[in-house]
């Protein structure tokens, strides 16, 4: 929907907003991502990601997280980078679920 115009909000509360062309603008649904980085995180480093499920395996650590949007994904990736960890993979595990 990048670059699309959103029609002004009108109507009753709780009504789904519409794009300028009349299509409904559906609410954002969370998606599940995995971010894998090199090295097996110990308890201290793992504590930096206490909002994620952590799996350690074969010299890698995988963070498993349900994130509401791309900003949250970017924030989690930035946390990994800020700790000077080398990212091996970022993967979408499950797309947004239907209402």
Image: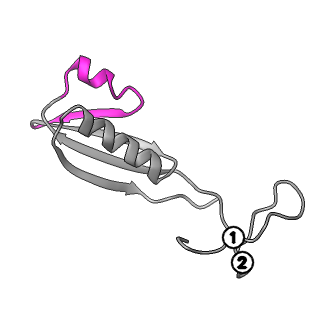
Label 1: which secondary element = loop
Q: Is residue 46 above or below residue 59?
A: above
- Quadrant where the N terminus lies? bottom right
Across and down, in percent, residue 26 comes to 66, 64
| Left or right position of 4 against 14 | left
Query: What's the distance in space between the residues labelled 2 and 1, CA to CA?
Result: 5 Å
User: x and y percent of residue 30 in the render?
Assistant: 52, 50
Secondary structure found at label 2: loop
Question: What residue is rendered at 30% in x and 32% in y?
Answer: 54
Would you call the spot at circle 1 few (<14 residues within 10 Å), some (14-19), or many (20 or more)?
some
Q: Residue furthest bottom?
A: 21
Is 32 above or below relative to 82? below
Q: Is residue 46 magenta?
A: yes
Q: Quadrant of residue 6?
A: bottom right
Among the two numbered marks 2 and 1 on one chain, the one whose residue lies closer to the N terminus: 1
| Side of 3 where 49 appears, left or right | left
Nearest the viewer among 22 and 66 is 22
Color scheme of the displayed model: one colour
Mark 2–mark 1 CB contact (< 8 Å) = yes
In the rendered image, the residue lying farthest to the right is: 12
Residue 65 percent location from the top left of the image = 40, 41
Q: Quadrant of residue 20?
A: bottom right
The numbered disc on residue 6 is 1
Left or right of residue 7, residue 35 in this image: left
Q: Residue at x 19, y 27 (%)?
A: 41
Residue 20: which disc? 2
Percent across and percent down for residue 31 are: 47, 52
**Rendered image: mark on residue 14:** none
């Amino acid at each position: 929907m990048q670059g699309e115009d959103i029609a002004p909000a009108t109507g009753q509360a709780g009504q789904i907003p519409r794009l300028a062309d009349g299509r409904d603008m559906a609410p954002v649904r969370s998606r599940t991502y995995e971010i894998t980085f090199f090295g097996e995180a110990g308890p201290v480093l793992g504590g930096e990601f206490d909002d994620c499920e952590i799996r350690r395996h074969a010299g890698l650590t995988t963070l498993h997280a349900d994130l509401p949007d791309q900003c949250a994904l970017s924030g989690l990736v930035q946390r990994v980078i800020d700790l000077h960890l080398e990212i091996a993979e970022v993967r979408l595990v499950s797309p947004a679920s239907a209402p």
